[in-house]
């Protein structure tokens, strides 16, 4: 599981741990990987795995007028290209019938500064649908587009969003279910 250290990642790990043996992956864990460095992803598949869950690589809010070309490329590399690289490696190494669950974002709820995130997440959603038609050996691919998290908004003095436990349940259901090519927007 990539990205198990953030709010959503910790909740997803807690939802999966009762029924799955997890390997938590971060830049600081014993098994290290960084979506911005596709070569680092190879180490994830040195042992057999049934599922890959990626909760890493959020795209920060930045007003369009303030975006630099370098920021655009960095965000595309980490969030979109990194998850594509992860899927390519997982498709070659996951056990038959395995599950790949990626993370989208908030493009269904645009706010100022979310344009780049909307671009990346819309691309990811299209990629998930397309990859589902291509993956071999009964592999499944899905994504969760969590949107705004209630606990994060509350910390900013705002209301609304989706509780992190509801988001974590969406990941668990996709890992353990039969769906493929789907992006779930939990509410």
Image (cartoon, rainbow, N blue to C red):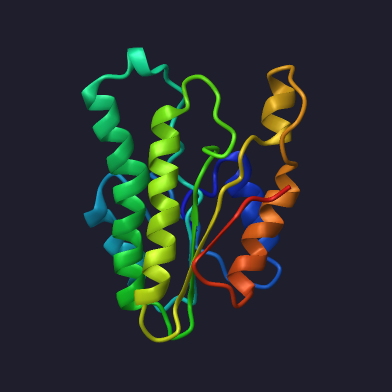
Determine whether 155 is above or below 184 in the image: above
**Horizontal relation, residue 46 to residue 161: left or right:** left
At 73% from the left edge and 47% from the top edge, which residue is drawn?
A: 187
At 63% from the left edge and 54% from the top edge, which residue is drawn?
A: 12
**Horizontal relation, residue 33 to residue 149: left or right:** left
At 39% from the left edge and 75% from the top edge, which residue is drawn?
A: 133
Q: Is residue 34 visible?
A: no
Please name whichever residue, 74 or 19, is drawn nearer the observer in this view of the structure: 74
Determine whether 25 is above or below 64 in the image: below
Indicate the position of residue 8 as horizontal and vertical percent values. 61, 45
Please name whichever residue, 17 or 114, is drawn nearer the observer in this view of the structure: 114
Determine whether 3 is above or below 85 in the image: above
Indicate the position of residue 183 as horizontal and vertical percent values. 55, 57
Among the 4 quarters of the image, the one containing residue 31: bottom left
Q: Is residue 123 visible?
A: yes
Point out the residue furthest to the top here.
65
Among the 4 quarters of the image, the one containing residue 120: top left
Indicate the position of residue 147 as horizontal and vertical percent values. 61, 39
**Horizontal relation, residue 130 to residue 178: left or right:** left
Indicate the position of residue 176 as horizontal and vertical percent values. 63, 74
At 37% from the left edge and 18% from the top edge, which residue is drawn?
A: 64
Q: How many marks?
A: 0
Among the 4 quarters of the image, the one containing residue 157: top right
Please name whichever residue, 40 or 147, is drawn nearer the observer in this view of the structure: 147
């Amino acid at each position: 599981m990539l990205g198990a250290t953030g709010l959503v990642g910790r909740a997803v790990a807690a939802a999966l741990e009762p029924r799955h043996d997890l390997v938590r992956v971060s830049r600081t864990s014993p098994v290290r990987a960084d979506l911005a460095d596709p070569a680092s992803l190879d180490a994830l598949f040195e042992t057999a795995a049934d599922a890959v869950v990626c909760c890493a690589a959020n795209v920060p809010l930045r007003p369009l007028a303030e975006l630099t070309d370098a920021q655009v490329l960095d965000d595309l590399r980490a969030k979109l290209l990194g998850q594509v690289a992860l899927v390519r490696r997982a498709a070659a190494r996951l056990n038959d019938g395995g599950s790949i669950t990626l993370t989208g974002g908030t493009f269904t709820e645009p706010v100022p500064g979310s344009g780049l995130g909307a671009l990346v997440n819309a691309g990811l959603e299209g990629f998930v649908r397309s990859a589902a038609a291509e993956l071999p050996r009964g592999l499944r691919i899905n994504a969760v587009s969590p949107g705004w998290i209630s606990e994060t908004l509350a910390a900013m003095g705002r209301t609304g969003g989706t509780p992190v436990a509801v988001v974590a349940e969406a990941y668990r259901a996709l890992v353990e279910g039969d769906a493929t090519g789907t992006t779930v927007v939990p509410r």
